[in-house]
Image (cartoon, helix red, strand yellow):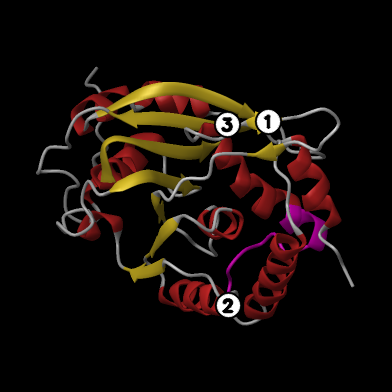
Amino acid sequence: MKSMGKLEDAARQLGLYLSGEHLAAFQRYYEELVEWNRRFNLTTVIGYEEVQLRHFLDSLTCLLALPGWGQEVTGSQLPFVCRPQPWLCLDVGAGAGFPGLPLKIVCAELKLTLLEATRKKVEFLVHVADDLGLKDVEVLWDRAEAVGQNPHYRERYDVVVARAVAELPVLAEFCLPFCRVGGRFVAQKGAEAERELEAAQAALERLGGAARGLTEVSLPGQRERRVLVVVDKVAPTPSTYPRRPGIPAKRPLVRAG
């Protein structure tokens, strides 16, 4: 039986020890991803080793940007991620579950909400969460602009994550309204991270965010640059944001001139 060995070895390089239970869950997740992908277009990355590194491991790198996590090594013991927290976590534009579900598999304490606008992907997310027996997982079928104005979800979350959803000025308007003051927004980005962050400065200022910085991520065997853009929520988001569906993408909050 395949063992998720690539994921296990690469995770250790991040300071994260994956138990047999974790690896079994990732194996099951992979099997369901492949099966559903035969019927619905969930992802173009489907090879066994590719999924381990480009989906599962890439998702887990978000831990590097979260407070209370880090490497703790004693003598010759393997490194491990320490100080788990029962955070409220939201994955905006969750797609096939990345990065939210891998984070939940490893961090059982997370209370996770997955927000996705495509119905078939929502059905997959509900199925996988149930199949893996994951508790405290809510799946929402809606757009971020609409849910962001719902008082039940607005400025509620400790951590908001997003991957491959939109350019950062637009993504900030999707995500920051969900962050509580004192919370953190983590966007997974690529080679253009610096340019996107510069373009997003006006949006961050208007939405109550302040850039903490960029965290470089190295994925074994992968050439593509991966960067975590880390934003702290320092002030409440004005009630006018997010604007109605479609407007953030059409008219991003960028500095004039």
Q: Secondary structure at mark 3?
A: strand
**Residue occupying image coordinates x 51% and y 28%:** 193
**Residue linked to disc 2:** 40
- The quarter of the image holding the N terminus is bottom right
**Depicted 25 relative to depicted 102: above or below:** below
Give the CA distance from mark 2 to mark 1. 41 Å
**Residue linked to disc 3:** 227
How packed mark 1 is, by other alpha carbons closer than 10 Å (few <14, some 14-19, many 20 or more), is some
The front one of 256 and 30 is 30
**Residue occupying image coordinates x 55% and y 53%:** 107
Residue lying furthest right in this view?
Answer: 1
- Looking at the rendering, which quadrant does residue 13 occupy? top right
Q: Amino acid at mark 3?
A: Val
Q: Amino acid at mark 2?
A: Phe
- The quarter of the image holding the C terminus is top left
Q: Which residues are magenta?
A: 40-52
How packed mark 2 is, by other alpha carbons closer than 10 Å (few <14, some 14-19, many 20 or more), is few
Give the CA distance from mark 3 to mark 2. 29 Å
| Horizontal arrangement in the rendering, residue 84 relative to residue 196 (left or right) | right
Q: Secondary structure at mark 2?
A: loop
**Residue occupying image coordinates x 47% and y 32%:** 67
Q: Amino acid at mark 1?
A: Glu
